[in-house]
Image (spheres, coloured by chain):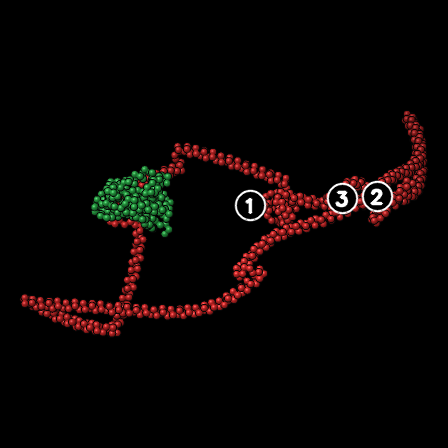
Chain colours: A red, B green
Amino acid sequence: MNNDIGSNDTILKMMNYLKPSVNKMEDDGEESQKNDSLNATTPLKRRTSFDVTTPLKKFKEENKTFDSSYMGSPREMRRLRADLIEARNTILNLENRISHMHGIRKEMQVLFDNETRSLRKQHEYDRKSVLELENQLQTIRKREHDLKQELAEVKNKNHLFKISTDQKIEELEKKLCNITSDHKAQETQENLEFSSLKKKILELQNQLDIAEESAQVHQKLCKELEKQLNERASAVTELEMKNKELQKLKLQMKEYDYIKENYLEYQEQSKTQARKLAQFIDMEKENERLKEENFRIKDEIKNKLLLEEEVHDLKRRLVKFKEQESKFASIQMQLVQTEMYLNEWKAVARGILEETNANDTALPHLLRSTVERLQQQELYLTDEKVNLQSQLNSALHEAKVAKEELSKNQKLLTKLSGTDEQKKNLIHRMQKKLLLVSRERDSYRLQLDSYERDLTMCVNTSALGTQAANQVQGLKERVENLEKIVSGYRDMVAKLENDLQNAEHDGPDLPPVKLEQISRLKDEIDQLKQERERLRERNDQLEIQLEEYLVGNDSLKGGKVYHLANNPLSECLSQREALIEKLQEEVDRLKRKVKNMEEGFESSKLVDISMSTKEVQMLKEEIKNHELQTQHLKEYFKTSMQEFRDVVYELLGYKIDKTSKSLYKLTSTYAENAEDILCFQLNNNGNLHLLETDFSSRLEDLIELHLKHQNSFPNFLSSLTLDLYSNRTMVTEQLQIIDD
Amino acid sequence: MATVQKSKSAITLRGSAEIVCDYLNYGINSILFQRGLYPPESFKNTENYELTMLMSTDQKIIEFLENTLTQVKEWLVGRIVNKIALVIMNVKTLEVLERWDFHVEYEGDTSSVEQHSEKPLNTIKKEIRDVLRQITSSVTYLPLLDCLCSFDIQVYTKNDVELPKEWAESEAANVKNAQCVKMRSFSTNIHKMETVVTYKNDDL
């Protein structure tokens, strides 16, 4: 116990020493203490608190690593930060531990109290057990009494038994008396029997003795047993009591041993804790140092970022300046050009003003004045021009009107002349008709004359005979008739002549009937003319057609056509015919052959065919071999291609796919998303071009630097790989830190 | 040359016939070459009329032309020939694709056997050259003969001709859908040759 108190004191001292640094955590510690005190009711649970020593050891190990020199890179920074966080964690752990130790101490005190209480309880229990033992003793005594009573009963029984045996003996004696009486009565008869009976009696007496002896032995034995029983019972009770006491003491001993061991361990632990606490101060110092360093580094990082921004800004400004420079050059060029133009303009102005020695400053004003003058002049002239134009237009209009009138008049004139001509024609035709009519008249006259001559001839022949008288009569009648007809004709002729004369005399003043006739005839003539015209056209057309038709045809002109019988054409034709015949024969032959073959004849000639089939088979096999070879080659190429692609992917970190003609897709190993793809196109000149994708639009900085500036795809791709890799590892590191 | 000179620069009837036949020989060879009836490698270059003419080396053609032209010459002298026609025919369909007509006209005193011409030979040759040039250039407008073709020479004569045994009567070759182009003519003042090509027009 003294030891315990000592250790407690040391712990308390330690606590006092640590308090300022642990102040912050004390609340939590107290809470945990409470919890621990609640939990630490049983000795077995206490053991759990001892396992916490291991993380402290770990912390020590980590402290060693903490001492490694600081490199200053962001990664190292990150690591340091992580370490710092770890250190803080360990500190927290330690504080927790200390508070825990306080808890344990209190727990121990409580435990001791409990122990004393339990011992007191034990004492009471012992007292109780003594009482119990006394009770037991009483019961045992009761039992002894009972046993004594039993013994008395047994004695009674024995006595009863003795009495009964005595009674039996009496009975037997009586019997014996009876038997003796009988014997005496029968002694004469049975002496032998008597003796035997005597013997039997003796034997029975012996038996009785033995029984008595055994009863005595039994009595003795009973007494001994009673004694033994008493002794044993007392011994047993004593033994039991002793055993119980022994066991209790043993248990107590064990507990004390156990407590003692625990105290020793506590002592050791407290020692180690003290050591650790001594180290903790150092760590605190180191921690502060690291914090300072951290602050410094952060400041530096801020400065660096500021500087980077400045650099970037300056770069941009540089680019702008460059652009402005180029603009400036172009502007200068333009200035020179404009100056040249100005000089030219000045020269032109001088030329216009015809004042070579005019001042440059005065030139524009002079030019303007001249131009204004000229414009005014032009205005005036245009005015005049417009006036003249209007005059011209009016004159032209008048001329047009006049022309129209003129054309109208001309048309009228032509119409009139046409009608005139028509009338002339009419007159001409009428004259012709007149001529015809007069000719008709002449012919009629001639006819008439001939008739008259006939008539005279008939008169001459009438004197020939009587037979002819009838004839003559008939003729006369005929003549008369004819004369009548003639006279009719004459009248007609006269009438016609009158008509003719009328016509000749009247001329244009024809009667309306005739005029009508004339117009009708005119129409007819016109119609006929039109028809003639039509027919002529038709004829021409037909002639043209005929000519066209006849171009290809040969006109024999009544001759004959000869040629050499042995000409190239006929030769060619005969050759062709021969060829066709030959082919036909061949076809026939082949057809026959095919037919025969189909019907299964001509087996004799099948050898060739079988040969050919064999050949075909061979060729087929060859083809198959070739196909297999190509298949193998294809597979080989496929595998080697895949291998090549894999190797490229492994080595360069890019999966290269060819999607379409000269379009290549690149996927990085470290790509954050599967959709992060770079597209390259190979154009006709063999140059590669980066096509815009969602991913590439996010890489403007890299494109600017590596493609536009350095013009190097490998640089671009490798820097992209590094970027992606660092991004990914950063992410994983952060994740790790979060996990820790 | 084959011209027979009776006096200085005088051409007889027979000489004129010979000039005409020469012209026919070169003209027909030229046509055969230009129209691609025979492979070009079977022709050889010959200088004549101040032109490079291509003459066939095919023995059959040479023989055929010789036989034909000697007979034609006789008939020309006899003034029986109206026209000599070179007919180009499709062998497969027997369709007449082209006909080259060489119309013959007899000038001057057509009854005399002892007819002479005073026309200078060089002038005649110049005229012939012009016609041959036209024949050569005719390829530009004549349709392409893209089938197997062969040719024949027909002689159109007047009636009552005593026919030699190798000769046979033929029929006039008519061209359907015809179009004709008239070339220049030349004359020896005894024979006047007029060359006309009639060909089947595919465009119609």
Residue A182, given in percent of the width and then of the height, sits at 92, 30
Residue A525, given in percent of the width and then of the height, sits at 27, 66
Q: Amino acid at mark 2?
A: Ile
Query: Which circle, 3 or 1, is nearer the viewer?
Result: 1
Q: Chain of mark 1?
A: A
Q: Amino acid at mark 3?
A: Leu
Residue shown at 47% from the left, 35% from the top:
A619
**Mark found first going from the N terminus, 2 or 3:** 3
Residue B61 seen in the current view: yes
Task: Say above or below: A201 vs A104.
Answer: above
Residue A257, given in percent of the width and then of the height, sits at 88, 38
Viewer-side residue, B126 vs A43: B126
**Circles 2 and 3: CB distance less than 8 Å?**
no
Label 2: state its secondary structure: helix
Q: Which residue is mark 2?
A: A281
Q: Report the Cα–Cα distance between label 2 and label 3.
A: 20 Å
Q: Amino acid at mark 1?
A: Asn
Q: Which residue is mark 3?
A: A80
